[in-house]
Image (cartoon, rainbow, N blue to C red):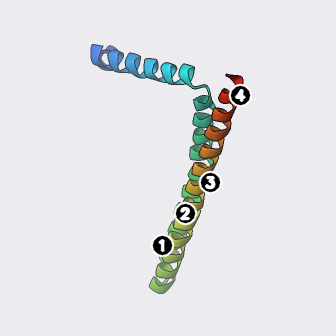
Amino acid sequence: MREKLRKWFNVDNIIDATVDLFLILFDVLSSPILIVMRLLRWIVGNYLLGGFKNKIKRLIHWTEGKHLLLQILVWTATICIAVIILTFMWLFGTAFGEFVMEEWGHQEIILD
């Protein structure tokens, strides 16, 4: 156990963690909207994309042992639908990010 702790808490890892924490704190303090954006990105990544990936995996495992033609049809449809859904999620995320940054910038101008 001590050996594992020594490997984890060496000088390089401590310096890397300290620099990363400083950069995160500096980013958050310089722009509080990043907190909201990071939380939204985390929620989307964990729940929407995680659930999406699990459903695809279950569908692909369901086709194991089925006829080859059915596998090809299901896999092709899955890939096409996944590309469409991921494209819409990317577009929505980009549009939402632009909207938030535009509103945030507009409020700063008003406050000045």
Q: In terms of image quadrants, where is residue 90?
A: bottom right
Q: What secondary structure is found at the residue carrying circle 3? A: helix
Q: Which mark is residue 95?
A: none
Of tags 4 and 1, the one toward the viewer is 4
Q: Position of residue 74 (x, y in %)?
A: 53, 77
Horizontal relation, residue 16 to residue 88: left or right: left
Label 3 Cα neighbours within 10 Å, binned few <14 / some 14-19 / many ≥20: few
Q: What secondary structure is found at the residue carrying circle 1? A: loop
Q: Which residue is mark 2?
A: 56
Q: Which residue is mark 1?
A: 64
Q: Which mark is residue 110?
A: 4
Q: What secondary structure is found at the residue carrying circle 4? A: helix
Q: Position of residue 105 (x, y in %)?
A: 63, 33
Find the distance from the CA under tag 2 to the CA under tag 4. Answer: 47 Å
Tell me, yes or no, if residue 1 can be seen here.
no
Classify 50 as above or below 88: above
Q: Amino acid at mark 1?
A: Glu
Of tags 2 and 4, the one toward the viewer is 4
